[in-house]
Image: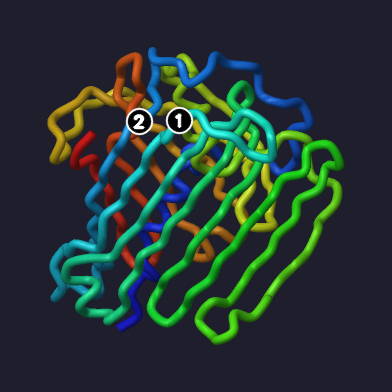
Amino acid sequence: MRTPKLAFVGFFLLSAALIATPAYQEKAPAETSHVPSSSFSAGEHLVYVVKWDPPWYFFFLPSMEAGEIDLEMVGESEYSGKKALKISFQARSSGTLMKMTGMNIDDEFVFFTEPKTYCTFLASKKIREGKRKRQIDIKYLRETKQLHIRELDEAVVPPKLKRDETKDNIPPCVQDPLSALYFYRLSPLRVGHLQTLVIGHDDRVKEISARVEKQEEIETPAGRFSAWRVTVLSLMGGLFKEGGQFLIWFSADEKKVPLQFEFRVRLGRVLGKLESR
């Protein structure tokens, strides 16, 4: 049976709660205050439990646990002599789905972003998915409008360099999905709010947009909340190869905590809920 490749990596695109039109946005985001406490603070640590609901034609299978996600705003740091914000993201497989597929996943992502604009300096990814072991580093070179991607296969000895490329004509401000997520939380959310951002994933850069559809009550392991439901209008080409729909819920208060996400594709539904914070 074909199962999602830890589809909860879809949460990593949770910033996809921020995506849509095909043209680049050349202007940088407006400046914001430094990790404003009104929305979130350094040290904020969010943990999510992720489940997979099989498609209808696997009616004999129940909803099952797929994994856990840790998201942390580590706080002030330094990157290449510049002040930076450090964001950490970890995705681990667990439960029934891991036992069924026999694949253990333990991915770690670290992002360094500019404090005022949330434009990304570096996205570093340590991929551990079964036998696949990769180290991928993407540097955004704002001054030259380039990005540099370096991918190392660490599953072999000695490690093998798979990619070492520079791409030109990159917008001057690109946000990785998680930096975009935090930046989005600074927005005054309300029904109908529509926002576009320039998002980078590996060597791809796209403009994205998301709309606040409604306010509703939701239940998570962390409690019951009033939340803004945000619908992704269009997804980055190549990120979700099967198409599908992506939703994310933010708490309807000044912190706008991402409480829940949902990703629907042909292979069913991936649902993540806040477990602790």
Rendered view: 168 above or below 1: above
Could you say where residue 224 lies in the image, as x and y percent from the top left? 14, 29
Tell me which residue sits at (38%, 42%) in the image.
247
Name the residue: 24% across, 44% down: 273
Asked whether 153 or 103 is in front, the reply is: 153
The residue wearing badge 2 is 43
Q: Is 62 on the left or on the right of 27, as rendered?
A: left
- Image quarter where the N terminus lies is bottom left
* Residues at marks 1 and 2 touching, judged by CB atoms closer than 8 Å: yes
Q: How many discs appear?
A: 2
Amino acid type, residue under disc 2 in the picture? Gly
Front-lying residue, 136 or 15: 136
The residue most toward the front is 81
On the picture, is 25 further left or further right than 54?
A: right
Q: CA distance from mark 1 to mark 2?
A: 6 Å
Q: Is residue 260 left or right of residue 131?
A: left
Tell me where residue 188 appears, x and y as whole percent.
Answer: 46, 14
Residue drawn at the location 40% of the way across and 61% of the way down:
265
First in sequence: mark 1 vs mark 2:
2
Residue drawn at 78 percent across, 64 percent down: 165
The residue carrying mark 1 is: 75
Identify the disc placed on residue 160.
none
